[in-house]
Image (spheres, grey):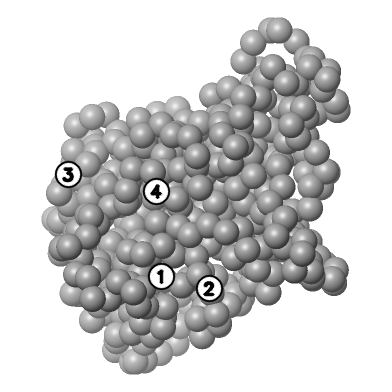
Amino acid sequence: MSVVVQDNQGWVLDSRSLIDEFYSRCVRFKDAHKSFVKCRFKKQCFQILQSHYNVSAGAAADGGNTDVLQKKDKPGKKRKRKHSELNQGEVDSQVFHEKIRSVILEGTNSLVGSARSLGYLNGETNAVKEPLPCQECSLAALCEMAKELPLVDEEEQEECVQLLVAEDGCTSHVDLFSRVTESRSDQATVVTLMGEEYVIPPDTAFLLSDFTRIQPLVHYGRTFDLIVMDPPWENKSVKRSRRYSSLPSTQLKRLPIPLLASPNCLVVTWVTNRPSHLRFVRDELYPHWGVEVVAEWFWVKVTTSGQFVFPLDSHHKKPYEVLVLGRYRSSADKSTSSSETSEVPVEDQRLIVSIPSALHSQKPSLSEVLKPHVRAEAKCLELFARSLQPGWTSWGNEVLKFQHTSYFTLTPTDDRGDKTADDCTDTLTPASSSPGESSLPCHCPTVD
């Protein structure tokens, strides 16, 4: 059950179940043969057993133990200045934290309590003692290399869509960097791309490119009712770790949101806890795109025992992140109020509580929690994506990262044996002529 708890304060999500639910039976193409496998995201990736500060059970999400958290939150050795000597950014962070602290604490306590009554977040009793997958992602580097290739001319841009699997049911050689790739099958597939195996969800589309080669997505000819993005924000830890390339905030204004958004499109942006980033999104970025801020939500990260992954009052890292939600108001619709449209109001200060992934920058899917706020056949887009979702279009220079088979456990689902690629046609059933034209299960928005 991917949504464990839902009430007026928010949700408790089982992020791993959200990934696995569409991979119970996948068609695997390898070496001109096909087989059927079940793919499950590796359990150890969502096995956060204790707080990162090694706080004992006192770190649970309840108000009576907050002092315990604070006592364990000691400054690192390199931090020589006194706690009272905060810079302006830290002062702003503390002011924001105090403003939302009770919402985070009380809401998390209530949601975790409800989840525990259902047998969830009561601690891990069957921990997997295997290391995390350590697949080195080279997709961003490949995107850099692809920039040396000439741009697709205007005539070819009209043919900017290609099928991941050919009409005869067999995998084809595809250009991932300059065309949107569609998988129109109603089953998940495991295919080889660029010499590596990837798990591809049903009825999905994606473009592997960086910021300078986003044109094929614009020429894709679709507008979207929901756009979710997780920008690579600049910060000191990213610069030190060099885990991914960051993007200056001002460059985000170049994203062609007005060309991609349908009227009243719901735009959702993941924001770090840096106040300057939050102000930029609210006061500059969204107004620049014509997006009206309607709510702020919070992703609260807890361990398998329901403890905050970091002390709530830590001065260094918080156990939550912010999502800014807004509605795109096109110039043609500015005279129409939201009450005159069919859009569903978005409640403010909702919580999304989940066990975070131990893999860097892997966010939980928002498809379930955002479903009530978009129309039934909504077309959905994720920008700066690092994974794919059924029924969605995804773009980014690491868009296939967490689809690599090294992150999954693959097990055979039947004993019918392998078949040659010539027999593929009885396996893949096209979902429609293009993603989104037929209805997916009710919990998954579709892509046009």
Q: Separation of disc 2 and disc 3 at Cα?
A: 35 Å
Q: Nearer the viewer, mark 2 or mark 3?
A: 2
Residue 386 visible, this orientation: no
Label 3: state its secondary structure. Answer: strand
Q: Which mark is residue 256?
A: 2
Dots 2 and 3: beta carbons under 8 Å? no
Q: Quadrant of residue 138?
A: bottom right
Q: Separation of disc 4 and disc 2 at Cα?
A: 19 Å
Q: Is residue 73 above or below residue 189?
A: below
Place of residue 428 in the rendered image (x, y in percent of width and height, measured from the top left):
66, 25
Label 4: state its secondary structure. Answer: loop
Q: Separation of disc 4 and disc 3 at Cα?
A: 23 Å
Callout 3, which amino acid? Asp
Residue under label 1, please give it: 271
Q: Separation of disc 2 and disc 1 at Cα?
A: 19 Å
Q: Is residue 255 above or below residue 2?
A: below
Place of residue 234 in the rendered image (x, y in percent of width and height, measured from the top left):
53, 78
As drawn, the residue found furthest toward the top would be 415
Q: Which mark is residue 378?
A: 4
Callout 1, which amino acid? Val
Q: In the rendered structure, which disc, 3 or 1, sits on the residue that comes first in sequence?
A: 3
Q: Nearer the viewer, residue 98 or 349?
A: 349
Label 2: state its secondary structure. Answer: loop
Q: Which mark is residue 7?
A: 3
Q: Separation of disc 4 and disc 1 at Cα?
A: 24 Å
